[in-house]
Image: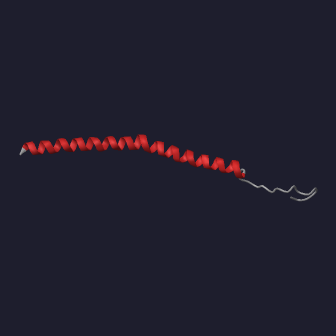
Amino acid sequence: MSDVISDDRGGFRAKRRRELLTFAVLAFGIWPIVAVGAVGGYGFLVWMYQIVYGPPGPHDVVPARPNSAE
């Protein structure tokens, strides 16, 4: 009877260790790389968009007439 309990406890510890290792790899390895890649990819897309269509801001600026209140 005690052999069954000790075998189950060993399996539980192995499963828990495997889950903690999986969590550590995801939390400190894969997700930071995914986050940096997503932000970097978005920045690259904005950069390419601005190269093709120009930076944001007023484009058709007409100079004010001389002696105007503008």
List the single residue furthest toward the left: 1
Q: Position of residue 43 (x, y in %)?
A: 60, 47
Apparent side of residue 42 relative to residue 64 in the rendered image (left or right): left
Apparent side of residue 13 relative to residue 61 in the rendered image (left or right): left
List the single residue furthest toward the front: 52
Residue 62, placed above or below residue 6: below
List the single residue furthest toward the right: 67
Q: Position of residue 26 (x, y in %)?
A: 39, 44
Q: What is the total number of numbered labels drawn onto the structure image?
A: 0
- The quarter holding residue 5 reads top left
Residue at the spot 7% in from the left edge and 43% down from the top edge: 2
Residue at the spot 61% in from the left edge and 49% down from the top edge: 45
Describe the colour scheme in one phrase: secondary structure
- The quarter holding residue 63 reads bottom right
Question: Which quarter of the rendered picture does the C terminus lie within?
Answer: bottom right
Q: Position of residue 31 (x, y in %)?
A: 44, 45
Apparent side of residue 62 relative to residue 2 in the rendered image (left or right): right
Residue at the spot 52% in from the left edge and 44% down from the top edge: 37
Apparent side of residue 31 relative to residue 12 in the rendered image (left or right): right
Residue 37, placed above or below residue 66: above
